[in-house]
Image (cartoon, helix red, strand yellow):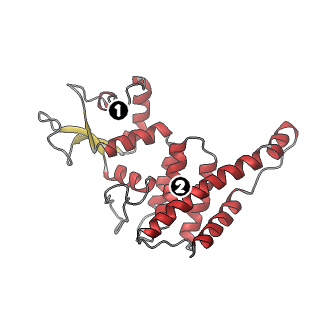
Amino acid sequence: MTDQEIKTHLRNLSIAATSVIPVVGGPVSYILDKYVPEFVEERREAFLRTLNDELEQVVEAGIEIDLQGERFISIFVRCVRLALDEYEQEKIDSFRNIIVNTAIPRQQDFDETSLMMNWVREFTGDQIRVIKAIKVNDEIAYYGEQSDFYYAVKHHFPKIPREYLIALAQDLIGKNIVIYGKGHRAPEIDKDTNKVWYLSDMGETFVSHITRPHAHNKANSAGVKNRVAD
């Protein structure tokens, strides 16, 4: 597809995804008629411009993309709708990167992408930032004698209250995204116990879906082969 064909194709899909507005009366109807169409159009156009630029970068890197498949179109429509409902840039970027990664053909034995989309929708922007911080730093050792998650990441988020950070961590730990144990990437971080907080394989897989292609190392996930990593 040419650059113009890609732009037109994406725009037509996005309009179809966001054109349905409920019919109501009263003050809400005034807001919908006067403000929402312009707001949605501006958000949609900004989202598509950035998406198109990123897809062009993938093509320029010599990577094949497929924008015609049923799987891509389905995920594109869902991600556009979800992204336009968000105000946190961290989540908007995550949905856009899921689309970019879906455009790259790959063998996928399970529907991991839908799970990743659900997690982006469910997580807060702060939770996604914590996950990315652990990824960027590879592993985060706890400080002193404390194995508490708060002490592990407070150095990277010094202004976050302890109770809030622990609340953020509960979902990440419960979903097996973040693990506390023997680190396999940097075993010398803590020489006494050799235990650190780090991303599980599913955590790595999540990051591979929500970041741009070639932005990270290849993440191997159980049941999925030949993943094109960021």
Q: Which residue is mark 1?
A: 156
Query: Residue at (43%, 40%) from the top-left corner?
Result: 129
| SS label for mark 2 | helix
User: In front: 225, or 175?
Assistant: 225
Residue furthest right in the image: 26
Q: State how far apart marks 1 and 2 are (Cα).
A: 26 Å
Q: Is residue 17 above or below residue 162?
A: below
Q: Nearer the viewer, residue 207 or 163?
A: 207
In the rendered structure, the answer to whether residue 89 lies left or right of residue 58 reads right
Could you tell me the amino acid type at mark 2? Arg
State the image coordinates of residue 88 (x, y, percent, origin top left).
Answer: 55, 41
**For this view, does 26 lie left or right of residue 130?**
right
Tell me the residue at 14%/40% (across/down): 188
Sequence order check: which comes first, mark 1 or mark 2?
2
Q: Amino acid at mark 1?
A: His
- For mark 1, give the secondary structure: loop
Instruction: Please count the marks in the image.
Output: 2
Q: Which residue is mark 2?
A: 96
Residue at image x 47%, y 64%? 57
Horizontal and vertical percent for residue 144? Answer: 20, 25
Quadrant assignment for the N terminus = bottom right
- The picture quadrant where one finds residue 213 is bottom left
Identify whether 108 is placed above or below 33: below
**Are discs 1 and 2 less than 8 Å apart at CB?**
no
